[in-house]
Image: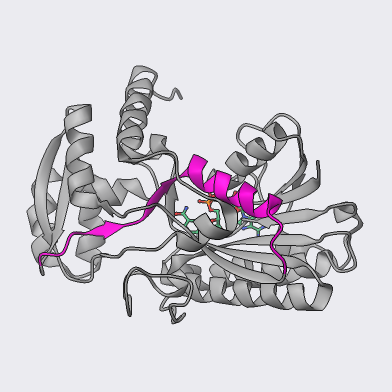
Amino acid sequence: MSRIAVTGASGRVGRAVAALLVERGHHVLGLDLVAPATPVPGVDYLVGDLAELPPQDPRLAGLEAVAHLGAFMSWRPEDASRVYDANATATQRLVRALDRSSVRRFVLASTGEVYPENAPVYQPLDEHHPRRPTTWYGLSKVLAEEITAFAGRASGWATVVLRFSHTQDPAELLDPDSFFSGPRFFASRRLTRERAAGHHEVADALEPFAGDDSTLLVASRADGEPVQMGILATADLARGVVLALEASTTGHEVIGLGPDAPTDLGAFARRLAVAAGLRTVDVTLPVSAPSYRTSNARARELLGFAPLLGEEELVLAAVEAREARLASPPTG
Ligand code: NAD
C-alpha cells in the first residue's frame, strides 16, 4: 500500500485511476483545478492550480508516487498560452513542489501527439519515433516529458512517460455533445470543423445533416487509406497507468500505451450506427485525416499490459449509455 498523488483526478482518466488505486488499497490524494463532479470514495482531494503550487509543498509530504495526468487539451490557437501553462509550466511547478519529498516514482501522461501521429515517419509508431510536434499541445507534452526526465535525474526518482493513445469513456462515443466524439462521429457536428478547415466539398456534403444528431459519419480518405487511429477505453488506460505506478522499473522509461490494433473510424461508425439504430452518411476526407497504427509492445513487455475491452465491448457500452441518456434527459 502506498500514498499516491493523482493530478487531474477530476478528469476522465484521473478519476478512473484514482478509483482503481483505492480499490487496490492505496491512499490517494487527488489534485485538480476543479472539484470532481462525483468524488471517488476514499480519495482526499486538493483543489487548485498545479502551476501555483509552492516549492517543497508540505501538503505533498509523505507521498511515494505521483501519476501526473492533469493537463489542458485544446487545439484552438487562442488557447496556446493556457495549454503551455497547464502542461509545461504546471509540470515544472509540480516537480518543484515535490522537491526533497519522499516521492520515488513519477508517471507522466504524455501523448502520441509528440510525434505527431497524424504525420508518421514510419509505422507502427513506437517510442523511438522522432518527436516533432506541430501543435502547442504536442510541444507542451514534449516539454513535460523533458521536465519529467530531468526530475528523475535530479531527484533520483524512477520516471515513466506514458504516451497515451486516444482514449474515451464508452459513454462518450454516441454522445453528440462529447468533446471528441461529437465532431468525430456526428455528421452535424463535423460540419463546422470541416468548414473552418476550408474543406468545402466535405462541408457541403454534410450540410443536409446540420441540426441532425442521428446520422453518423462513415469516413474514408481520398487516397483509399482507412481513417484509423488507436482508441483505448478509459478503463484499460487507467489499468496501464496503475501498472506503471506499481511496476519496478528504474531510471527513465518511455512507454506507448495503446490498443493492440487501430480502429477504422468509418467501419466503427457503421457498427455503432447499426447497434444504435442510427443512419450513416459516407464522406471522403482529405489525406490529412489521421491514418496511423501504434505499437504497444513495450507496454506489454515492461508493464504486462494487455487491453481487455475491444471494439465489440465499446459498441455495446456506447449503445447502453445512449439508451440510458435518452431515457433520462438532463433536467433544468
Ligand atoms: P481531462 O480533460 O478529462 O482531465 C484533465 C484534468 O486536468 C481536468 O480535470 C482538469 O481540470 C485538470 N487540470 C487541467 N489543468 C490543470 C491545472 N493547471 N492544475 C490542476 N489540474 C488541472 O483529460 P483526460 O482525457 O482525463 O486526460 C488525462 C491526461 O491524458 C492528460 O494529461 C492528457 O493530456 C493525456 N492524454 C489524453 C488523451 C485522450 O484521448 N483523452 C490522449 C493522450 C493523452
Q: What stretch is highlighted in magenta?
A: 224-250
- Is residue 225 on the magenta stretch? yes
Indicate which quadrant contains ligand 1: bottom right
Tell me if I can see residue 215 in this picture: no
Identify the residue shown where x is 72% and y is 61%.
106
Residue 218 is left or right of residue 127, and the answer is left
Quarter of the image containing the N terminus?
top right
Front residue of 123 and 45: 123
In the rendered image, the vertical position of residue 230 relative to residue 86, given as above or below: above
Identify the residue shown where x is 22% and y is 28%.
276
Measured from the top left, where is residue 65 in percent x and y? 77, 55
The image quarter in which residue 103 lies: bottom right
Measured from the top left, where is residue 60 in percent x and y? 85, 54
Front residue of 124 and 215: 124
Toward the top, the furthest residue is 327
Identify the residue shown where x is 10% and y is 65%.
224
Measured from the top left, where is residue 191 in percent x and y? 20, 54
The image quarter in which residue 281 lies: top left
Residue 275 is left or right of residue 159, and the answer is left
Residue 323 is left or right of residue 49, and the answer is left
Tell me if I can see residue 94 in this picture: yes
- Is residue 244 on the magenta stretch? yes
Indicate the colouring scheme. Answer: one colour
